[in-house]
Amino acid sequence: MTEMIALSRERGSGAVRRRRRRTMMRWGGKLLQGVITLLLVSLLIFFATQAMPGDVAKVILGVNATPERLATLRKELGLDAPLLQQYLTWLGGILRGDWGVSLTNGAPVADTLSLRLRNSLTLGALALIIMLPISLVIGVIAAQRKDRVFDKLFMGGSMVVNAVPEFVLGTVLIALFGTTVFRIFPPVSLIPPADMPWWHPLALVLPVTTLVIGGVAYLSRLVRVSFIDVMNSEFIQTAQLKGLSTRRILYRHALPNALAPIIPAASLVAAFLIGGTVVVEYLFSYPGIGLSLVESVGNRDLPMIQAVVLIIASAYFVFNFIADLLSDAGLGGTHDPAERPEPRARVGAPSALPRARTVLRLEPGALGDRPRGAHDAARLLLHPLIDKSIRYRHR
């Protein structure tokens, strides 16, 4: 018996090692795929910006510049070299941390974007911190009151919010709270470059609110659907028949399972907040990378455009990779007692054989359509079997 147990443990440890090796290979493949994707994106960004109409030298020197000055400036900027050579030079500078010089003000792109990126990250982080708990609460309440008044109002309102563009929602908030009706918050977020964004909390209210409303409308619907699916599962119905309290069922069994698809979705929402704040920042004149992108496109500032778009693409890759890791790792995974591992036989135990399991499986809604008296009677009759099954599963 001891040899059988040792062999079983050896096989189990080998299976664990193989599973870990497959997981690492899968993560490595995703990382390699992401790096290749970023290289292709950088190639597309560079050639797309180079294909934009207009002459950079004329933008810098003006339309009255002489041909000699234009030719000299093109040579200084490396614009007279072949496109492939320009791309390799630009990519090498990116890898070394040299993002180039802005054609508008002559400042290094990295120095300018470091301040703007800090502001954008602050805006997105505040929106995400506020968005997640609100989405969780609203989604759970809507799931508990399925097909009732609150649920119908929530579904209709979230559908309307998802259909409304962000600039329309932001314009409505500006009219209500910034200019026309109440005039509580500033309509534009004028933050000096040297100041931290949180030094001006009133300037953050309307941009953050615009992002939060759109994110809550999406995430709360996902929480609602996931929570309803979990509440209709067999192990939740078994816990209800066992007589567990509603609070214990919701917070110990249902909620962790409902969070399983929410956590990767939150990572994708975070990626959207990095790149999706372009409209919001431009609408509120918030000094982030979104506003920098709009201004650089208007000024045809190619180094700034290339750097901002590459940052946004990298953010999407990083957060998508995090979402894949969370999904593969099973974060927020199932808390179904039936899926827990079986107890192992131990040397010296009274019996080396596992105890027989008594499993009761009920179809969803099998007792829900009966009168209350019949439901209670069935629960009392089946309680010993259910209690034995759940006690064994929780060992």
Image (cartoon, grey):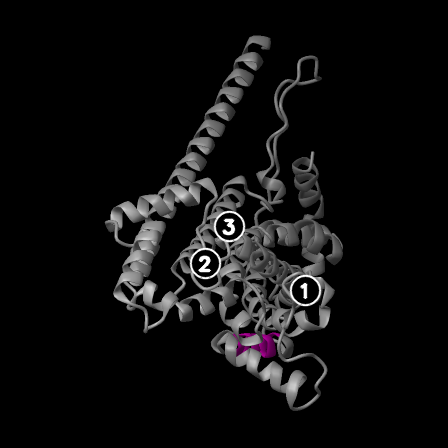
- Which label's residue is closer to the chain start, 1 or 3? 1
Residue 296 on image: x %, y %: 44, 66
Nearer to the camera, 395 or 128: 128
Q: Which residue position is annotated with label 3?
A: 319
Q: Tell me the CA gap for discs 1 and 3.
A: 24 Å
Magenta-drawn segment: 151-161
Identity of the residue furthest to the top in this view: 3
Q: Disc 2 or 3, which lies upstream in sequence?
A: 2
Please tell me the numbered disc located at residue 137.
1
- Which label's residue is closer to the chain start, 1 or 2? 2
Element marked by disc 1: helix
Secondary structure, mark 3, is helix
Between 33 and 7, the residue placed more toward the observer is 33
Say left or right for 308 vs 288: left
Give the class, few, some or many, for how many residues have Cα within 10 Å of label 1's Cα (few <14, many ≥20). Answer: some
Q: Which label was assigned to residue 102? A: 2
Could you tell me which residue is drawn at 60 percent across and 36 percent down?
A: 340
Q: Quadrant of the C terminus?
A: top right
> For the residues carrying marks 1 and 3, which lies nearer the camera in this image?
3
